Image (cartoon, rainbow, N blue to C red):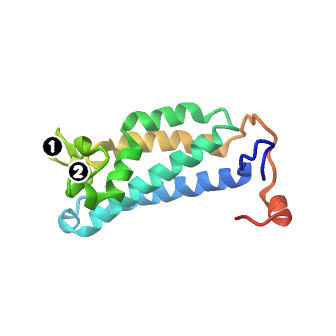
């Protein structure tokens, strides 16, 4: 669907579903990490690095969809501020996505690559006092608290800024490119 200025508008129902899916993906990934994080094998395994990478991707995607949702639903502004206050989510995701460049010292934000508190890259997760830190930076317990607030909001009625359009109606009218 396009507005008069040729801007593509994503149907609200699709935004809502995508927000819910990425929230579920993130909470599922958190549960997986928490289940395995105290295993001595997990500490040494590649799986821990992959899990951390997927946490970063899920968190970034959730923030992207919530930013779109916030255009229509008033309650997400504080949630987004709280999520973004944890650490630079985009930076964590970008460094993971461009890991080779950062190790070659060619990353766009090379000066942020090393977690100076622990003298290791922000690609690597940390477990400190039985608390998992995504990229050694984001406390998973603080994140879970924010996600619980988000679940409550998503399960309640919304204060729409604009009238929603049914995704099913739109799918019948025009193909999604």
Question: Depth check: 1 or 22 in front?
Answer: 1
Question: Depth check: 14 or 2 in front?
Answer: 2
At which x and y percent is residue 131? 27, 46
Which residue bears the numbered disc 2? 126
- Mark 2 or 1, closer to the camera: 1
**Residue displayed at 51% across by 45% down:** 63
Query: Where is residue 84, by image quadrant?
Result: top left
Which residue bears the numbered disc 1? 118
**Residue displayed at 32% across by 42% down:** 139
**Which badge, 2 or 1, is on the more N-terminal residue?**
1
Query: Where is residue 36, by image quadrant?
Result: bottom left
At which x and y percent is residue 85? 41, 33
As drawn, is 33 to the left or to the right of 2?
A: left
Kindly state the secondary structure of the residue where label 2 is placed. strand
* Separation of residues labelled 2 and 1 (CA atoms): 9 Å
**Residue displayed at 17% across by 39% down:** 116
- Crowding around mark 2 (Cα neighbors within 10 Å: few <14, some 14 to 19, many 20+) is many
At which x and y percent is residue 170? 82, 59
Kindly state the secondary structure of the residue where label 1 is placed. loop
The disc placed on residue 39 is: none
Q: Is residue 30 visible?
A: no
């Amino acid at each position: 669907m396009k507005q008069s200025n040729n801007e593509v508008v994503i149907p609200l129902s699709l935004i809502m579903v995508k927000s819910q899916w990425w929230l579920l993906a993130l909470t599922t990934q958190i549960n997986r990490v928490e289940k395995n994080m105290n295993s001595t094998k997990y500490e040494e395994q590649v799986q821990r690095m992959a899990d951390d990478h997927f946490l970063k991707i899920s968190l970034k995607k959730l923030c992207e969809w919530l930013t779109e949702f916030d255009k229509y639903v008033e309650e997400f502004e504080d949630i987004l501020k709280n999520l973004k206050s944890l650490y630079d989510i985009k930076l964590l995701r970008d460094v993971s996505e461009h890991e080779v460049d950062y190790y070659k010292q060619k990353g766009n934000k090379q000066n942020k690559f090393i977690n100076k508190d622990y003298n290791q890259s922000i690609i690597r997760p940390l477990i400190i006092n039985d608390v998992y830190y995504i990229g050694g930076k984001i406390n998973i317990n603080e994140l879970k608290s924010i996600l619980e607030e988000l679940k409550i909001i998503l399960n309640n009625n919304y204060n729409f800024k604009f009238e929603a359009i049914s995704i099913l109606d739109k799918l019948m009218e025009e193909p999604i490119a």
